[in-house]
Each structure stands twice: as C-alpha cells, then as structure tokens.
Image: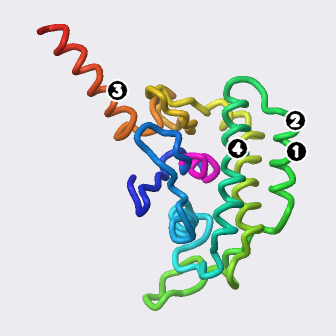
Amino acid sequence: MAAPYDLRFDCGRICLDLVATAGGAPAAGERLTGPASLAAWLTGAGVVPPGAPLDAVDAGWVARFRALRELLGRVVRAEVRDRAAAADLALLNTAAESAAPPAVRAVRGPDGALAGALAGPPDCAGLLAAVARDAVALLTDPAARGRLRQCAGDGCPLVYLDTSRGRRRRWCSSEVCGNRARVARHRRRTAGAA
C-alpha cells in the first residue's frame, strides 16, 4: 500500500511499520524525511486518528522517532534470530513507560457517524510511548512473536507479522519484494532457455 512519502503500512504492526520507514529496503531511501512525512506516518499507521492536530511535529520529533525506529529494528531483528540485548530491552521498556499515550475518544461527525478524535494535541513522548508499547505487546505475545518473519527478498531487512493462511508468506510485500523475486526468477528462466 503506497502513501505519501512512499510510506508502507503492510508489516502487520505499528512498531514494524515504523521500522519499515528506514532506508534499508531495496531501492528505498529514508522515508521520515521531515515533519510532514512523520505526521503522514503517524496518521497512516493509526497512531493518531485522521485529522488529529499535528502542528507541533518538528525536526526534534523526527529525530526522536528515528532513534526509536533504530532501537526497534535492533530489538525485533535480534528476537527473530535469537535474543535482544538486555540493554536494548531496557531502553524499549523505558520508552514504553515514559509517558501516557494520547487518549482517543468517540465523537460524532457531521454525518452522525462516530469517529476517533484526540482530546487535545498529542505530545511526542506520548506518541513514542504508544509505538514502544505496541512493540512490547508484540514481543511478549508468544503467538504473535511466533509469526514474526524476516523478509526473504534479496537485501531486504524488513521483519513482518505473517498473518497469512498457512503461515507461508515469504516477503514483506508481495508487490515489492515478491514482485522482485518473481521478475528475477523469470529472467533466470528466460536466460537459461536462450
């Protein structure tokens, strides 16, 4: 699923979608390029409801979210392979405990339908805590943790939550890494036939 700033929301969890904003995936650059891209990610990932006031997002917020992203990437990849370092887990726990995530309340829209809205402008620490708590919930749920997979795409560092039937998903995205693998396989077949 493409979005502004080429953001991806297909990894299965908010914390994994934040890790996917790094420039490590094939042919991808940094996706959290500034306040506007971070605000788009916060809304697209569902950290805040659409229309939430994000005027306070600035370069400091971007730096703090990039730092959390780096920590989450280390912890999640280490847990997929074996175990995360105790120091990294302590940092993750500190981030999760540092502030209260913003409360979402139900409000009636002009059409009468219920929609989520924040009581006031969110603060950076609360939003960071919400993402860190998502990671803690993921890593401490044995069933969810057992569905974590490293993408099989060449050079793709992404980890995703495999919710496919039969748990046979191989790529972070069928449209991105899956398509690259299919094209490469086709080229090998046609080169071998020639």
- The answer to whether 28 is drawn above or below residue 79 in the figure is below
Outermost bottom residue: 110
Say what secondary structure mark 3 lies in: helix
- Residues shaded magenta: 14-20
In depth, the one of 8 and 65 nearer the eye is 65
**Would residue 164 appear left or right of 1 to someone viewing this image?**
right
**Would residue 149 appear left or right of 180 to someone viewing this image?**
right
Determine the main secondary structure of the stretch shown in magenta.
helix
Mark 2 burial class by Cα count in 10 Å: few <14, some 14-19, many 20+: few
Q: Is residue 16 magenta?
A: yes
What is the distance, in whole Å, between disc 1 and disc 4 at their CAs? 16 Å
The residue carrying mark 2 is 86
What is the distance, in whole Å, between disc 1 and disc 3 at their CAs? 37 Å
The residue carrying mark 3 is 181
Mark 3 burial class by Cα count in 10 Å: few <14, some 14-19, many 20+: some
Between circles 1 and 4, the one closer to the viewer is 1
